[in-house]
Image (cartoon, rainbow, N blue to C red):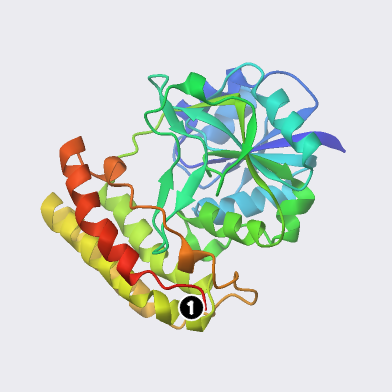
């Protein structure tokens, strides 16, 4: 068995892969690309220009969660690096991730992720109790993060784990299709006893615009409340409802301010949630004090333009969320 599978799900990602693949150094690893039925000819291009890359053809656009699960079933590495195609590896990234896993073999390890301008994109994630995930370290000097340290959640952009760990967790929940599937997996991992770490000496560049688009709003809002309901007991979910209603109103306000395409996306998300309202809950929900007592503020600086507006929204909503936050029983 080889040491590592670098798993990349592609959907019309040929241009991104052309930038990523040259940054992957030679070593005891395989690169496995799942083609989620894109139309960019990635299979023929890989065969001609990158014959060492293994390709798995999905045959349809399965979504990010199911695409990764398909890749996991074909992976031959003892460890797996789940990696977005629109990334680049900086020198030494694989070694630093491996070193963190050597010290904590059951962990999920995320690197320090930078944006295209060299600023911190994320050093892991944190989670608001209504299911809104935010990126840690945004705007902080990259030099301020070094070594390996615990974080609440890894970023789905890039994280490494033992293949046995991911298989033991059942992989990603394919219902999500895309967005928040990484949060779901990580919350389940935390409460199965797996440490969540950031190896900040491992650096990955993410060429992505973090702005909320109508497409992204639809999937985030379609998935957010069902994720909370899945990962909590029925009693906890009932106690969380007031805060969930407040966040729902906030997302409607965001959509209304952004225009008709956002309103339509938010409406489609609500309709999808209603159709899936009887989706089975988790067989092993997380303890009641996880989402129910999280005090992370909503990430307004990552959602709205202008620091002054972000501070105003935080000042208005933080006391409300504190009031509505259910306490541990």
The residue at 75%/52% (across/down) is 165
Is 181 situated left or right of 261 in this image? right
Measured from the top left, where is residue 162 in percent x and y? Answer: 76, 45
Q: Is residue 305 above or below residue 185?
A: above
Q: Is residue 94 above or below residue 79?
A: above
Q: Nearer the viewer, residue 115 or 235?
A: 235
Identify the residue position indicated by label 1 in the image.
Answer: 236
The residue at 59%/54% (across/down) is 186
The residue at 55%/49% (across/down) is 152
Q: Nearer the viewer, residue 183 or 175?
A: 183
Q: Residue furthest right?
A: 1
Q: Is residue 15 above or below residue 194?
A: above
Q: Nearer the viewer, residue 200 or 79?
A: 200
The residue at 71%/41% (across/down) is 80
User: Does residue 274 appear in the picture of this structure?
Assistant: yes
Q: Secondary structure at mark 1?
A: helix
Measured from the top left, where is residue 250 in percent x and y? Answer: 22, 61
Measured from the top left, where is residue 67 in percent x and y? Answer: 58, 51
Quadrant of residue 99 within the rendered picture: top right
Measured from the top left, where is residue 198 in percent x and y? Answer: 60, 36
| Marker count (numbered) | 1
Location of the N terminus by quadrant is top right
Is 52 situated left or right of 179 in this image? right
User: Does residue 115 appear in the picture of this structure?
Assistant: no
The local crowd at label 1, few if under 14, some if 14 to 19, many if 20 or more residues have their Cα within 10 Å, is many
């Amino acid at each position: 068995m080889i040491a590592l599978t670098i798993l990349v799900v592609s959907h019309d990602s040929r241009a991104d892969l052309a930038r990523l693949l040259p940054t992957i150094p030679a070593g005891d690893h395989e690169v496995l690309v799942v083609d989620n039925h894109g139309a960019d000819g990635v299979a023929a291009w890989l065969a001609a220009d990158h014959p060492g890359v293994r390709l798995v053809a999905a045959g349809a656009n399965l979504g990010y969660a199911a695409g990764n699960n398909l890749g996991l079933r074909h992976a031959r590495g003892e460890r797996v690096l789940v990696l977005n195609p629109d990334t680049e590896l900086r020198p030494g990234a694989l070694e630093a991730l491996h070193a963190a896993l050597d010290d904590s073999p059951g962990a999920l390890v995320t690197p320090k992720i930078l944006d295209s301008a060299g600023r911190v994109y994320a050093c892991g994630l944190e989670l608001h109790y209504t299911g809104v995930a935010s990126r840690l370290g945004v705007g902080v000097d990259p030099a301020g993060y070094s070594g390996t340290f615990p974080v609440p959640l890894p970023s789905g952009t890039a994280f490494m784990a033992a293949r046995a760990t991911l298989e033991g967790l059942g992989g990603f929940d394919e219902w999500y299709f895309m967005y928040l599937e990484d949060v779901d997996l990580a919350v389940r991992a935390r409460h199965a006893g797996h440490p969540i770490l950031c190896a900040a000496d491992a650096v990955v560049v993410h060429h992505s615009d973090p702005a909320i688009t109508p497409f992204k709003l639809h999937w985030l809002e379609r998935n957010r409340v069902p994720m909370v309901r899945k990962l909590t007991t029925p009693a906890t979910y009932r106690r969380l409802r007031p805060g969930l209603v407040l966040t729902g109103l906030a997302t409607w306000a965001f959509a209304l301010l952004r225009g008709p395409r956002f309103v339509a996306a938010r409406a489609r998300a609500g309709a999808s949630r209603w159709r899936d309202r009887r989706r089975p809950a988790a067989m092993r929900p997380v303890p009641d004090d996880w989402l129910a007592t999280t005090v992370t503020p909503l990430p307004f600086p990552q959602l709205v333009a202008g620091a002054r507006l972000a501070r105003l929204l935080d000042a208005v909503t933080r006391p409300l969320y504190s009031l509505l936050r259910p306490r541990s029983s």
